[in-house]
Amino acid sequence: MHGSPPWDDVDTTAVGERILAAASELFYLHGITATGVELIAERAHTTKRTLYQRFGSKEGLVAAYLRRRAHLWQVELHEKLKDAASASASGRLDVVFSAAIDRAASATRGCAFVNAWAECGPADTESARLIVGEKRWMADLFTGIAGDAGKGRVIHMLYEGAQIRSTILGDDTALPQARDQAEVVLGRDDA
């Protein structure tokens, strides 16, 4: 099991939760740039002023959105891996890929972090740092499962590539095939 605990969740008020829920839905469905704070405030039944009081800026809200998504995903994986703590590395790898396959079935726009990176890019923002951090967390997770940095890196590349192929090409076989190839990498002595 991955040793480090999942990222902290976003701590906000009830109104902040409504704003974050509205922003999360809109950012994921329409993109960060295309979603204005006016629409988020309207959807959350509040004002732009309240949005800014809770999150400081649109960037602060984007960072909260990414932190929440990372937290939920990491908690889900952490719990599933805790239940599979006595499983082999292969079994734990299957847990992660199975969770990704389940999530991909309802994630019509693919990975929120890849999408956010495409919009935010490598700017010096909290959002960019969160995106990189989430991808590093996943890489560390695979390294921990594989017990080897080289194998973990290759498995992570398979995973990320399958996420993108699944989204862009609508390839429902991408993640299962990546899981199968990750098993091959896991069994190799020279990765």
Image: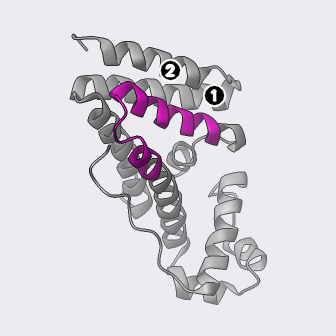
Residue 26 rendering spot, x and y as whole percentages: 71, 61
Residue 33 rendering spot, x and y as whole percentages: 63, 57
The answer to whether 75 is drawn above or below residue 165 in the figure is: below
Characterize the magenta stretch by its predominant secondary structure. helix
Write down the residue under mark 1. Answer: 166
- Residue extent of the magenta highlight: 78-103
> In the image, which is nearer the foreground, mark 1 or mark 2?
2
Indicate the quadrant where residue 8 lies.
bottom left
The mark nearer the N terminus, 1 or 2, is 1
Residue 167 is one of the magenta-drawn residues = no
Residue 85 is one of the magenta-drawn residues = yes
Amino acid marked by disc 1: Ser
* Residue visible at 64% across and 63% down in the picture: 24
* Residue visible at 71% across and 26% down in the picture: 170
Indicate the quadrant where residue 16 lies.
bottom right
Mark 2 burial class by Cα count in 10 Å: few <14, some 14-19, many 20+: many
Can you see residue 7? yes
The label on residue 41 is none
The C terminus, quarter of image: top left
Write down the residue under mark 2. Answer: 178
Pointer 1 with pointer 2, Cβ within 8 A: no
Q: Is residue 179 left or right of residue 43?
A: left
The N terminus, quarter of image: top left
Amino acid marked by disc 2: Ala
